[in-house]
Image (cartoon, rainbow, N blue to C red):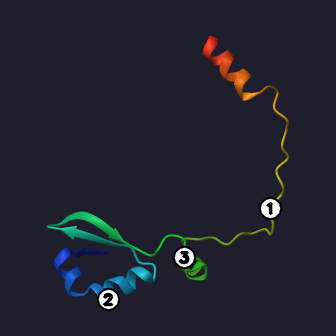
Amino acid sequence: MDVAVRELKAKLSAYLQRAAAGELITVTDRGRPIAVLGPVIGRVDLDAAAEAGWLTPASATGLVPVRRHPPLRSVLETLEEDRAE
Protein backbone atom coordinates (compact mmCIF):
# COMPACT_ATOMS: atom_id res chain seq x y z
CA MET A 1 0.00 0.00 0.00
CA ASP A 2 1.25 3.51 -0.80
CA VAL A 3 0.62 6.54 1.40
CA ALA A 4 1.67 10.17 0.91
CA VAL A 5 3.69 11.93 3.61
CA ARG A 6 0.85 14.36 4.35
CA GLU A 7 -1.69 11.56 4.89
CA LEU A 8 0.83 9.59 6.96
CA LYS A 9 1.30 12.58 9.27
CA ALA A 10 -2.45 13.01 9.66
CA LYS A 11 -3.13 9.33 10.45
CA LEU A 12 0.21 8.13 11.83
CA SER A 13 -1.23 5.95 14.61
CA ALA A 14 -3.50 4.05 12.22
CA TYR A 15 -0.66 3.39 9.75
CA LEU A 16 1.67 2.29 12.55
CA GLN A 17 -0.95 -0.20 13.74
CA ARG A 18 -1.28 -1.60 10.23
CA ALA A 19 2.51 -1.88 9.91
CA ALA A 20 2.75 -3.61 13.30
CA ALA A 21 0.11 -6.09 12.09
CA GLY A 22 2.40 -7.07 9.22
CA GLU A 23 1.41 -4.77 6.36
CA LEU A 24 4.18 -3.10 4.34
CA ILE A 25 3.43 0.56 3.71
CA THR A 26 5.39 2.55 1.14
CA VAL A 27 5.66 6.24 2.01
CA THR A 28 5.71 8.54 -1.02
CA ASP A 29 6.68 12.17 -1.53
CA ARG A 30 5.09 13.68 -4.64
CA GLY A 31 4.48 10.18 -5.95
CA ARG A 32 8.08 9.02 -5.44
CA PRO A 33 8.73 6.22 -2.88
CA ILE A 34 10.98 7.41 -0.05
CA ALA A 35 10.51 4.87 2.77
CA VAL A 36 8.83 1.64 3.78
CA LEU A 37 7.04 0.99 7.08
CA GLY A 38 6.59 -2.57 8.24
CA PRO A 39 6.68 -4.89 11.24
CA VAL A 40 9.78 -5.17 13.41
CA ILE A 41 12.18 -7.66 11.85
CA GLY A 42 12.08 -11.01 13.61
CA ARG A 43 8.54 -10.59 14.92
CA VAL A 44 6.34 -12.33 12.40
CA ASP A 45 3.11 -14.07 13.32
CA LEU A 46 3.87 -17.44 11.73
CA ASP A 47 0.27 -18.65 11.91
CA ALA A 48 -1.00 -15.52 10.14
CA ALA A 49 1.80 -15.80 7.56
CA ALA A 50 0.83 -19.41 6.78
CA GLU A 51 -2.84 -18.43 6.48
CA ALA A 52 -1.91 -15.58 4.11
CA GLY A 53 -0.01 -18.09 1.97
CA TRP A 54 3.44 -16.49 1.93
CA LEU A 55 4.90 -19.02 4.37
CA THR A 56 4.76 -22.79 4.00
CA PRO A 57 4.99 -24.81 7.23
CA ALA A 58 7.70 -27.46 7.39
CA SER A 59 6.63 -30.88 6.17
CA ALA A 60 9.15 -32.86 8.25
CA THR A 61 10.26 -32.67 11.84
CA GLY A 62 13.86 -32.23 12.90
CA LEU A 63 16.97 -31.72 10.82
CA VAL A 64 19.51 -34.37 9.91
CA PRO A 65 22.97 -33.54 11.31
CA VAL A 66 25.60 -32.57 8.75
CA ARG A 67 28.51 -34.98 8.44
CA ARG A 68 31.72 -32.98 8.41
CA HIS A 69 34.78 -34.19 6.52
CA PRO A 70 38.34 -33.33 7.57
CA PRO A 71 40.08 -30.85 5.23
CA LEU A 72 42.66 -32.15 2.77
CA ARG A 73 45.00 -29.26 3.63
CA SER A 74 45.03 -26.11 5.72
CA VAL A 75 43.66 -22.77 4.60
CA LEU A 76 47.19 -21.32 4.78
CA GLU A 77 48.51 -23.98 2.40
CA THR A 78 45.68 -23.27 -0.03
CA LEU A 79 46.32 -19.49 0.11
CA GLU A 80 50.06 -19.94 -0.44
CA GLU A 81 49.39 -22.14 -3.46
CA ASP A 82 46.87 -19.66 -4.86
CA ARG A 83 49.22 -16.70 -4.43
CA ALA A 84 52.14 -18.51 -6.02
CA GLU A 85 50.28 -18.92 -9.31
**Mark earlier in primary sequence (2, 1):** 2
Distance from disc 3 to disc 1, alpha carbons, whole Å, reads 22 Å
**Residue 67, position in %: x, y?**
85, 46
Say which residue appears at 32% left-offset and 75% top-offset.
1
**Mark earlier in primary sequence (3, 2):** 2
Q: Amino acid at mark 3?
A: Val
Write down the residue under mark 2.
14
Assign a secondary structure to mark 3: loop
Write down the residue under mark 3.
44
Q: Amino acid at mark 1?
A: Leu
Horizontally, residue 68 falls left or right of residue 15, namely: right
**Residue 44, position in %: x, y?**
54, 76
Say which residue appears at 25% left-offset and 63% top-offset.
34
Q: How busy is the neighbourhood of tag 2: few (under 14 within 10 Å), some, or many (20 plus)?
A: few
Q: Are marks 3 and 2 in contact (CB under 8 Å)?
A: no
Q: Quadrant of the C terminus?
A: top right
Q: Nearer the viewer, residue 50 or 11?
A: 11
Distance from disc 3 to disc 2, alpha carbons, whole Å, reads 19 Å
Horizontally, residue 28 falls left or right of residue 53, namely: left
Say which residue appears at 55% left-offset and 74% top-offset.
53
Q: Amino acid at mark 2?
A: Ala
Assign a secondary structure to mark 2: helix
Q: Are marks 2 and 1 in contact (CB under 8 Å)?
A: no
Q: Nearer the viewer, residue 32 or 69?
A: 69
Considering every residue shown, the one lying at the far front of the view is 76
Horizontally, residue 82 falls left or right of residue 35, namely: right
**Residue 47, position in %: x, y?**
61, 82
Instruction: Give the quarter of the image for residue 26.
Output: bottom left
**Mark earlier in primary sequence (3, 1):** 3
Instruction: Give the quarter of the image for residue 81.
Output: top right
Write down the residue under mark 1.
63
Q: How busy is the neighbourhood of tag 1: few (under 14 within 10 Å), some, or many (20 plus)?
A: few
